[in-house]
Image (cartoon, grey):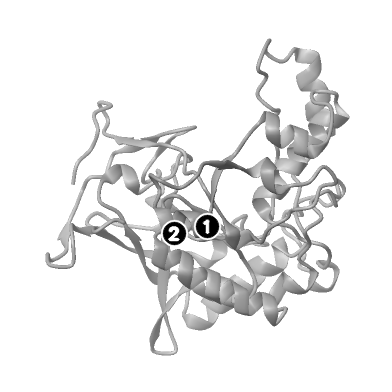
Amino acid sequence: MAQGLLEVAGAIDLGQFWPVGESDADTVHIGVVPGAFRFRPDKNFAFQVTHAFEGAAVRGKARKDCIDSKGRVTIRLQGIDAPELHYRPDPPKSKGEPLTQKQRTAFNHENGNFRQFYGETATLALHSFLAKAGASPLACIVRTAVDQPNDVFDTYGRLVGDIFIKAGGHEVNVNHWLAEHGWAFPTFYSSTSSSEIADVSALAETARKSKSGFWKQASANVLAFDSTLLYRKGGPPDPQDDRGSVILPKLFRRVATWAVAKKTKLVTGSFQKYLSAYPDACYATHDLLEQGLAAATHRRLDEFVTAQGVFTVQARDLVFQEATSRVVDRNGTPVHW
């Protein structure tokens, strides 16, 4: 477990959220200024300003500047995953010959910017909560338990952390608010601390049992994919029509890719077979917490989906392996605090 703590002072432009903007309920852009990042190696040290990420970039599955040209950092809200507002699949990576132009054309023809039920509603709920806390841009603090700069960003260049705002005179963890009110699934990665897993699991379980937010229509049937349910840029919001079966977003993204790929004959067979061919490494949550990351048994997502397309565990029961990434300066040299 990380002993260090990184804090980032920023501001949230509320206009970024759908339907005015395109941000959803679990990815938030925050504006920062020089000196916004502070780090302490453990609780016995005082915070010190770090400039490690100014002019630096993340190298992972994509290359992305830590701070974009508009002075913003993209935050992936740790421990949660909200229903997808917009997801356009990429063709499955071929294990043999690269895709032909004909195959790519066919895939693109059937592809779409897909969404899940409650993706819009969850985003509206988050925007409403933040708007009640204060005017835009809304001051916030992002915190993440890390030891090294490479621990901070995921493979897509998003800072993984918890966002805190002041609401009603108190500091509120936005990640926890979304889980508590049923607007996000608990979704854990190997970078998530045991305390964060416990906290989000408890909040989400309370929401599930009380059927708050989307939980009243959460489903274990992962094959209920509707290819006509597409992103609606600009809305208008229609919460009464945004109701229907919703599954774990990580599974939704994969079933969307499989559905388009199967329709265009890039893959064959069941969704379970597809997951087996394109595996996601994971751990059973209880095993990881008991044994630790080094000793826990490696599992694969397809083990938890039946041939009939039923997800056999709860979202909180799995911890996914975080993909690697590196933070480098303009010269490609690894950065340090």
State the residue lying farthest toward the top.
97
* Left or right side of 161 for 305: right
Q: Depth check: 79 or 166 in front?
A: 79
State the residue lying farthest toward the bottom.
168
Q: Secondary structure at mark 2?
A: helix
Q: Residue 289 — which label?
A: 2
- Local packing at callout 2 (Cα closer than 10 Å; few below 14, some 14-19, many 20+) is some
x and y percentages locating residue 228 in the rendered image:
87, 48
State the residue at coordinates (84%, 65%). Answer: 244
**Corner quadrant of residue 44:** bottom left
Against 157, is 193 above or below? Answer: below
x and y percentages locating residue 98 in the rendered image:
67, 13
State the residue at coordinates (62%, 55%). Answer: 22
* Left or right side of 160 for 82: right
Q: Secondary structure at mark 1?
A: helix
Against 41, is 298 above or below? Answer: above
Quadrant of image for the N terminus = bottom left
Q: Residue 77 — which label?
A: none
x and y percentages locating residue 310 in the rendered image:
79, 52
Q: Depth check: 25 or 256 in front?
A: 256
Q: Which amino acid, by three-letter code, is at mark 1?
A: Thr
Q: Which amino acid, by three-letter code, is at mark 2?
A: Leu
Q: Which residue is mark 1?
A: 285
* Left or right side of 38 for 235: right
Against 321, is 48 above or below? Answer: below
State the residue lying farthest toward the left.
45
Asked if one can make out residue 90 in the rendered structure from this viewpoint, the answer is: no
x and y percentages locating residue 157 in the rendered image:
44, 42
Image marks 1 and 2: residues in contact by CB distance under 8 Å? yes
Q: CA distance from mark 1 to mark 2?
A: 6 Å
Q: Depth check: 176 or 311 in front?
A: 311
